[in-house]
Image (tube, grey):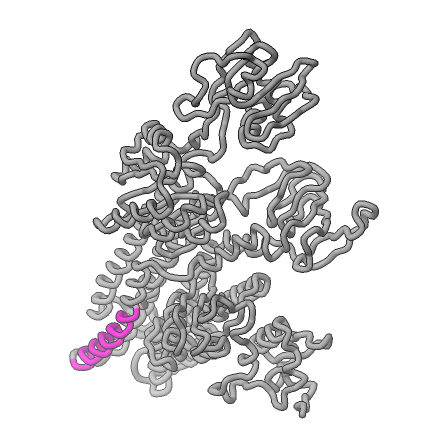
């Protein structure tokens, strides 16, 4: 039997809808009023997952705040069988967006709550992106249990959606701004009354009636700050206490309440000091600190946010192409392989595609970190998420939008931030014990001053609670790591695992693969040796004409070398598999290939043509009765390889080269780069054995590779890097993906790791020094409550500003 739903009631929970509110959700094509953004968020989630039938079949309203201990039935709509939660046969995982994150203390509280839940194997909340990663056992836990556990400590969680997440962050920022404005206004008005009373009290000109009037006025002006602006601190403290933990909002809330109610008692009795100015100033300064922290988190997560919003929601489908060029706007998620789409200048490409018609410049900066636009022409592939920068393109879809390059990248990002490095875990543990020690210390200080000087007991205890708010300690590590991660992502380095910066900084050995890592992974023309009277340029033109239609890597090397040369045209082309090409250029017959193939028309070979020189591959060109030239090709070193190896040598790291190529070629590359330890002809298991032997001796190993045969050793290394153009399997097993496909990104990451560890140590040192200095000063009565608030806010600001230095490229 359906519930009788009143028009003035919230369609979700049944509570009255506030006058003038505009919260609503379209359910079964009918706009339904909601009483608050929380009900709006839950109802929208129910619709989004295709469970609108819940509202048609229910026989009562959803649980509201009047009975918050019950499990809301809408949370039970989520199931382990949902595709979005699938991981493997025994476990599930999800990335959730969490509403109500106020500071790093919220992170600790939510993680602690979830790790107590039976079946939860891992829970990690990224303070920068406000996304919660959870992994749980299918047999012991359901998604609804997780959402309910988060709800029980005062937060709302739902499956991550980039657009909805962005809207919520914007709304949260506006709310915090309004609370900050009210607190600032209250503080200034209270100061207007307090300042004259301080001045008049010194010369005795303020009578009792006027003093009482000013106290009552200050009380009324403080109420908005207490009842509205300070609510985030009270909510956080209450959530901590309900979860039987001592979060960092607890001492803050106690300090505010102690100052306020102590002042209220003094106002009613007419005896004692009032601290309305201190209370309002403390609320204002703490909100300022949190506002700056919020902006710092937004900046630190800006690169991730840009990626998450990069894929377009729609695409222009050309269903009748090529006969009909009319377009229809369709959801990007509905595109199928083979669909033809039109992408106008300035639009993002919805899915991995191949260009059917047109030539344009593409902005790949979100995918690779490379700011310069790249030209693409008909027949070339383009990745989903690239921006069309110049001319319109007609594309044929190669993969659905959900499997595009950017979507795969976002799946890797889902793994990013899903844990904490050891230094962050240490800071969390210290901060948690710090709160308990602080409360016990405040009680002891209050007891001492009650015996020594009762008039000072209350203000000193308040000052201790206020000055020692552990915000700086809790912000020291996550803010710096988030800023460093954002900086690297903007340069084309995606950090997938949380320990990368810390482990790379400690690494003793840097192990490189050769092909595709230290080298370009493709042959290039290194040298032209003349064997006849035809000039080198002329020979290169003939070779390029013969190779013009070939897809062989050696052919591409010849064509790349001949780009600046005028192109001739070959006729009567014939390809002999594994030997070479034969054709006519300007009426002359040529052969291009190995020595035996060319010798058939050029005559006996000249000198030793059996092998290449110094590991290089020879390619011969000849005509009837004449040898013309020998092209020597090899896999060239990356331009930045020497600088990268030299940097690690200067840092005292041991550099090792492991390759599956021939031993002679491997040793040649090692000698060219100055690498003392090099092993060639290594199988995948031999590479892994080599790394494990190093680790057995106490070495911390960083591995850089790109191929499928590197997947095992990438997993086995302490920290690993996969080239962005490398195999997907290698990327899936790596801790870091070099989206830029540039080896210099490893160097950038190493430098950023060193800076990050230095700044984290500076932040932790500053937070520790501040507390060791400020807390005794407050306990001895040298700091009054309002000055304690200034010190607390300043300490957090110093930590945030220092961490944001890491965002500079």
Which portion, as a residue range, is magenta?
432-451
Q: Residue 182, percent across and down? A: 49, 70
The vertical placement of 636 against 277, above or below, is: above
Q: Nearer the viewer, residue 700 or 208?
A: 700
Classify the position of the N terminus by image quarter: bottom right
Q: Nearer the viewer, residue 249 or 417?
A: 417
Q: Residue 616, percent across and down? A: 44, 25
The question of residue 446 being in magenta is answered with: yes
Q: Residue 589, percent across and down? A: 65, 15
- In this figure, what is the number of numbered marks? 0
Residue extending farthest to the right is: 323
Residue extending farthest to the bottom is: 1
Classify the position of the C terminus by image quarter: top left
Residue extending farthest to the top is: 533
Q: Residue 11, percent across and down? A: 65, 83
- The residue under the point 41% across, 77% down is 234
Dividing the picture into quadrants, the one containing residue 204 is bottom left
Q: Is residue 196 visible?
A: no
The vertical placement of 418 against 652, above or below, is: below
Left or right of 773, for residue 510: right
Left or right of 720, for residue 609: right
Left or right of 547, for residue 239: left
Q: Nearer the viewer, residue 587 or 66?
A: 587
Q: Mostly what secondary structure, the magenta segment?
A: helix
The question of residue 801 being in magenta is answered with: no
């Amino acid at each position: 039997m359906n519930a009788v739903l009143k028009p003035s009631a919230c369609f979700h929970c049944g509570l009255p809808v506030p006058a003038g509110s505009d919260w609503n959700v379209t359910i079964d094509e009918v706009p339904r009023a909601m009483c608050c953004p929380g009900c709006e968020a839950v109802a929208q989630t129910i619709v989004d997952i295709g469970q609108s039938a819940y509202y048609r079949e229910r026989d009562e309203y959803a649980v509201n705040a009047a009975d918050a201990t019950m499990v809301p039935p809408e949370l039970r709509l989520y199931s382990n069988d949902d595709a979005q939660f699938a991981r493997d046969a025994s476990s599930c995982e999800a990335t959730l967006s969490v509403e109500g994150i106020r500071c790093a203390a919220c992170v600790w509280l939510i993680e602690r709550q979830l790790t107590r839940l039976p079946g939860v194997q891992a829970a990690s909340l990224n303070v920068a992106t406000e996304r919660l990663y959870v992994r749980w056992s299918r047999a012991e836990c359901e998604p609804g249990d997780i959402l309910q556990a988060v709800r029980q400590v005062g937060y709302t969680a739902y499956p991550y959606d980039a657009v909805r997440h962005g809207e919520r962050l914007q709304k949260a920022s506006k709310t915090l701004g309004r609370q900050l404005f009210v607190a600032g206004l209250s503080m200034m008005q209270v100061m207007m009354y307090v300042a004259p009373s301080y001045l008049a009290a010194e010369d005795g000109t303020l009578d009792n009636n006027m003093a009482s009037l000013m106290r009552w006025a200050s009380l009324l002006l403080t109420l908005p700050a207490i009842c509205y602006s300070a609510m985030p601190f009270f909510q956080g403290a209450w959530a901590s206490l309900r979860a039987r933990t001592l979060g960092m909002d607890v001492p803050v809330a106690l300090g505010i309440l102690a100052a306020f109610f102590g002042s209220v008692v003094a106002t009613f009795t007419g005896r004692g000091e009032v601290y309305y100015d201190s209370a309002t100033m403390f609320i204002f300064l703490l909100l300022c600190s949190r506002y700056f922290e919020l902006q710092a988190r937004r900046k630190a997560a800006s690169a991730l946010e840009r990626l998450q919003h990069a894929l377009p929601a729609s695409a222009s489908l050309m269903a009748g192409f090529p006969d009909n060029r009319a377009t229809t706007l369709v959801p990007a998620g509905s595109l199928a392989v083979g669909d033809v789409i039109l992408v106008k200048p300035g639009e993002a490409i919805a899915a991995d595609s191949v260009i059917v018609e047109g030539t344009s410049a593409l902005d790949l900066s979100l995918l690779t970190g490379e700011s310069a636009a790249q030209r693409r022409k008909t027949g070339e592939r383009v990745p989903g998420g690239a921006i069309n920068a110049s001319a319109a393109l007609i594309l044929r879809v190669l993969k659905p939008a959900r499997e595009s390059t950017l979507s795969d990248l976002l799946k890797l990002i889902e793994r990013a931030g899903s844990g904490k490095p050891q230094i962050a875990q240490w800071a969390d543990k210290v901060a948690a014990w710090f709160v308990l020690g602080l409360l016990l210390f405040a009680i002891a200080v209050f007891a001492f001053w009650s015996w020594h000087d009762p008039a000072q007991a209350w203000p000193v205890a308040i000052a201790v609670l206020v000055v020692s708010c552990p915000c700086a300690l809790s912000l020291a590590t996550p803010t710096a790591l988030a800023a460093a991660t954002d900086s690297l992502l903007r340069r084309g380095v995606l950090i997938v695992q949380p320990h990368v910066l810390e482990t790379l900084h400690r690494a003793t050995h840097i192990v490189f693969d050769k092909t595709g890592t230290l080298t370009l992974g493709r042959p290039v023309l290194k040298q032209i040796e003349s064997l006849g009277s035809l000039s080198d340029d002329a020979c290169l033109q003939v070779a390029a004409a013969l190779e013009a239609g070939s897809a062989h890597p050696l052919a591409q090397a010849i064509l790349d070398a001949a780009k600046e040369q005028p192109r001739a045209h070959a006729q009567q082309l014939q390809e002999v598999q594994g030997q070479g090409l034969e054709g006519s250029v300007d009426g002359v017959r040529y052969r291009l290939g190995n020595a035996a193939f060319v010798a058939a028309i050029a005559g006996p070979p000249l000198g030793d043509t059996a092998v290449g020189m110094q590991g290089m591959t020879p390619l011969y060109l000849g005509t009837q009765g004449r040898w013309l030239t020998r092209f020597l090709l090899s896999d060239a070193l990356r331009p930045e390889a020497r600088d990268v190896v030299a940097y690690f040598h200067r840092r005292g790291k041991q550099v090792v080269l492991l390759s599956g190529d021939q031993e002679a070629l491997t040793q040649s590359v090692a000698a060219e780069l100055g690498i003392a330890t090099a092993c060639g002809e290594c199988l995948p298991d031999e590479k892994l054995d080599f790394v494990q032997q190093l680790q057995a001796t106490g070495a911390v190993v960083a591995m850089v590779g790109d191929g499928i045969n590197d997947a095992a050793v990438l997993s086995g290394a302490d920290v690993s890097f996969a080239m962005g153009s490398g195999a997907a399997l290698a990327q899936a097993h790596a801790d870091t993906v070099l989206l830029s496909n540039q080896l210099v990104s490893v160097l950038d990451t190493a430098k950023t790791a060193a800076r990050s560890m230095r700044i984290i140590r500076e932040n932790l040192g500053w937070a520790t020094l501040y507390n060791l200095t400020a807390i005794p000063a407050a306990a001895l009565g040298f700091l009054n409550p309002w000055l304690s608030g200034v010190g607390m806010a300043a300490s957090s600001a110093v930590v945030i500003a220092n961490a944001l230095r890491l965002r500079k490229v």
